Image (tube, rainbow, N blue to C red):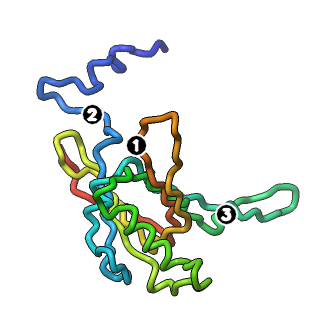
Amino acid sequence: MPIDTAEFSGDFIAPGGGAGGFEPQRVNNFMLDIALDNLALSSTKDNTPIRLSLKTFPFPADDTEATVISFINSKRKVPGATTYADMDLVVTDYVDQLTAQLLDEWRRLVFDPRTGMKGLAKAIKAQATLSLFAPNNTLERRWKLIGLWPRALKNGAGNMESNDVNVITVTFALDYWYAERLQASA
């Protein structure tokens, strides 16, 4: 039986004219809010410098290992331990903002090279909300990131041959994430 190609017309993809369907999600419509209020930061507890310096941040990912069970001449797989992927936050390094200071101070709560001491989990971990918006600013997806802490900090690089803007990269480890269920938008 031949396939009816009319069913797969391009008219269904972002058609306009009030007919709904298949509006693509843009990757630049997102916001990251990190709750800094439980951290012992002296620079600021305000998330605004990070929000306004955002350049890139991945959407959450996880992976569940397969546990293999041998039985007679075959193998069966069942879910094993789940790992939540580290997340690299890239921010623009503004000279007149506290972004670099805030991220460095948080990283030093994790490990302070001057003393060789590490912070307790309750003093270094934060929660965050990653929100994804449609082009018309309606909230489409929201993830809660639990137990977020800066595992690595890269302050960028100097380059005498370039006029590029410096960026700071922070690798965050996290305990887990979950998607919040939202009302479907029309």
Determine which residue is flagged by label 2: 23
At a point 43% along the width and 73% down the height, the residue shown is 105
Residue 72 appears at what percent x and percent y? Answer: 87, 61
The extreme left residue here reads 18
Confirm or deny contact between disc 2 and disc 3 (CB under 8 A): no
Q: How many numbered discs sit on the rendered protein?
A: 3
Residue 84 appears at what percent x and percent y? Answer: 54, 63
The amino acid marked with disc number 3 is: Val
Judge the density around disc 1: few (<14), some (14-19), many (≥20) Cα neighbours within 10 Å. Answer: few
At a point 74% along the width and 59% down the height, the residue shown is 76
Q: Circle 3 sits in a helix, a strand or a loop, which is it?
A: strand
Indicate which disc, 2 or 3, sits on the residue closer to the N terminus. 2
Label for residue 147?
A: none
Seen in the picture, residue 115 relative to 11 is either above or below; the reply is: below
Seen in the picture, residue 2 relative to 97 is either above or below; the reply is: above
Label for residue 78?
A: 3
- Dividing the picture into quarters, in which one does residue 164 lie? top left
Judge the density around disc 2: few (<14), some (14-19), many (≥20) Cα neighbours within 10 Å. Answer: few
- Nearer-the-camera pick, 170 or 83: 170
Indicate which disc, 1 or 3, sits on the residue closer to the N terminus. 3
- Dividing the picture into quarters, in which one does residue 130 lie? bottom left
Residue 123 appears at what percent x and percent y? Answer: 44, 85
Disc 1 from disc 3: Cα separation: 47 Å
